[in-house]
Amino acid sequence: MRFLTGLLAAVLLIAGMGASHAVVRIADDRGGRIGTYVDKYQDLRQSGETVIIDGLCASACTIVLGAIPHDKICVTSHATLGFHAAWDFGANGRAVTNPEATHMLYAMYPAPVKRWIAQRGGLTPNMIFLKGKQLQALYKPCFLDAQASANKPAASR
């Protein structure tokens, strides 16, 4: 019954969307260079598209939380956000924390996300994960779990 209710909600939601209400789905994004994500999300913000987080969004991917309006982001039950300090390659190719970039990254997050991170010791070299009920308390649910999982490539970018 829950599956049918979710499927019905997804169908009704999608049926009500016009071309101007496109969606972008994040499902397995391990991050990368901060600048690349700032540029990517600036373009996405200007497009007005809704972002569905339906899997892992880690590292620089989490910039989406500060770049996209809160009401344009939803999370499925599969959503997981991973946070850590920014880093550069140091001597001998080893990862070295970049305090300036870490501060910039942290400053991009909305206040409730900053509080959640601070309660866990801040951004450190160790990844911390926001998911489940804690994440769903901060962001609206998508109600697309069944649809998004069944049609992963359809809404991906």
Image (cartoon, rainbow, N blue to C red):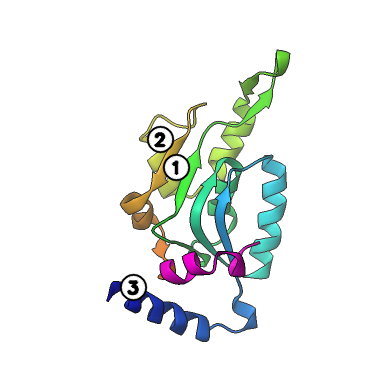
Look at label 1 and name its amino acid.
Lys
Residue ID at (34%, 56%): 137
User: Dot 3 lies on which element?
Assistant: helix
Q: How far apart are marks 1 and 2 (CA)?
A: 6 Å
Image x and y of residue 49, in percent? 61, 69
Q: Where is residue 62 in the image (x, y as percent from the top left)?
A: 55, 47
- Which of the two residues, 114 or 149, is positioned nearer the viewer here? 149
Q: Do the residues labelled 1 and 2 touch (CB within 8 Å)?
A: yes
Label 3 is placed on what type of residue? Phe
Q: Is the magenta stretch mostly helix, strand or loop?
A: helix
Asked whether 147 falls inside the magenta stretch, the response is: yes
Point out the stretch of residues depicted in magenta: 145-157
Amino acid type of disc 2?
Ala
Disc 2: which residue: 118
- Sequence order check, earlier mark of 3 and 1: 3
> Which image quarter is the C terminus in?
bottom right
Residue that carries the numbered disc 1 in the rendered image: 114
Residue identified by numbered label 3: 3
Task: Tell me whether the residue at label 3 lies in contact with that at label 1, contact meaning CB atoms closer than 8 angstroms.
Answer: no
Q: Of the two numbered discs 2 and 3 on the same chain, state the one appearing first in sequence.
A: 3
41 left or right, relative to 138: right
Looking at the image, residue 121 lies above or below residue 96: below
Residue 22, image x, y percentages = 61, 74
